Image (tube, helix red, strand yellow):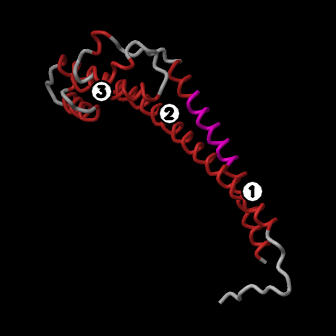
């Protein structure tokens, strides 16, 4: 009975090793797929990270100095550019107001009888600029999110491979143990389970 239980548990461990090995392979593939797609999609935009005087602002410099002058190819670069370059410029031009707030002001001003056409046009230009900035930020932050998922998939792959190795070793040790244990004889009775 004990030998059969050892074998059952050991084979279950070996099956788990195969499953985790397959999962690790799929997670590695997913991580590489995501990383390559993020890199390709960002590289196709031909965005060069700002450098020199463009990043001297203290709200920008600490976050973009490490990427200065590099082509944008990673989610980390995309997040830094979105949050610490585009957003900084959007906030400066709008006084910290969002696209939604400026758009609401624009609609109200436009509907106001006798509104100054120059003020309406100026607010409309700001609204359009904030819309484009918000859209670009959203796209770049999506690249960051997918890049992060790729990194998480790679860590999960490492864990799956480690688990597979552990189950493989334990399964093989269990089978070795089962082979060494002598079959139960009639003179030897195992204690009854209560």
In the image, what residue occupies the spot 84% across and 75% down? 183
Front disc: 3 or 1: 1
Q: Pointers 3 and 1 in contact (CB under 8 A)? A: no
Residue 25 lies in the magenta-colored region: yes
Residue 62 picture location, percent across and down: 28, 23
Direction from residue 186 to residue 86 in the image, left or right: left
Find disc 1 in the rendering and name its residue: 172
Residue 38 picture location, percent across and down: 53, 28
For the residue pair 59 and 118, the one nearer the viewer reads as: 59
Residue 78 lies in the magenta-colored region: no
Find disc 2 in the rendering and name its residue: 147
- Mark 1 burial class by Cα count in 10 Å: few <14, some 14-19, many 20+: some
Q: Which residues are magenta?
A: 21-36
Q: Is residue 17 something that shows in the picture?
A: yes
Quadrant for the N terminus, please. Answer: bottom right
SS category of the residue bearing label 2: helix
Q: CA distance from mark 2 to mark 1?
A: 38 Å
Q: Earlier in the sequence, mark 2 or mark 3?
A: 3
Q: Earlier in the sequence, mark 3 or mark 1?
A: 3
In the image, what residue occupies the spot 23% across and 29% down? 106
Find disc 3 in the rendering and name its residue: 87
Q: Pointers 2 and 1 in contact (CB under 8 A)? A: no
For the residue pair 28 and 12, the one nearer the viewer reads as: 12
Q: Residue furthest right?
A: 186
- Indicate whether 107 appears above or below 9: above
């Amino acid at each position: 009975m004990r030998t059969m239980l050892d074998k059952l548990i050991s084979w279950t461990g070996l099956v788990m090793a195969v499953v985790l090995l397959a999962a690790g392979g799929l997670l590695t593939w997913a991580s590489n797929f995501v990383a390559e797609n993020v890199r390709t999609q960002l590289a196709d935009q031909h965005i060069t990270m700002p450098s020199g005087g463009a990043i001297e602002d203290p709200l920008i410099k600490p976050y973009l100095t490490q990427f200065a002058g590099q082509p944008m190819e990673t989610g980390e670069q995309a997040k830094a550019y979105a949050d610490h370059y585009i957003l900084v410029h959007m906030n400066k031009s709008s006084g910290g107001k969002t696209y939604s707030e400026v758009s609401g002001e624009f609609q109200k001003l436009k509907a106001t009888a006798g509104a100054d056409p120059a003020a309406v046009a100026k607010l409309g230009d700001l609204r359009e600029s904030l819309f484009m900035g918000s859209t670009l930020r959203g796209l770049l932050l999506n690249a960051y999110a997918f890049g992060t998922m790729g990194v998480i998939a790679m860590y999960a792959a490492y864990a799956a491979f480690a688990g597979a190795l552990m189950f493989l070793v334990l399964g093989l040790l269990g089978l070795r143990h089962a082979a060494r244990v002598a079959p139960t004889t009639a003179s030897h009775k195992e204690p009854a389970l209560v």
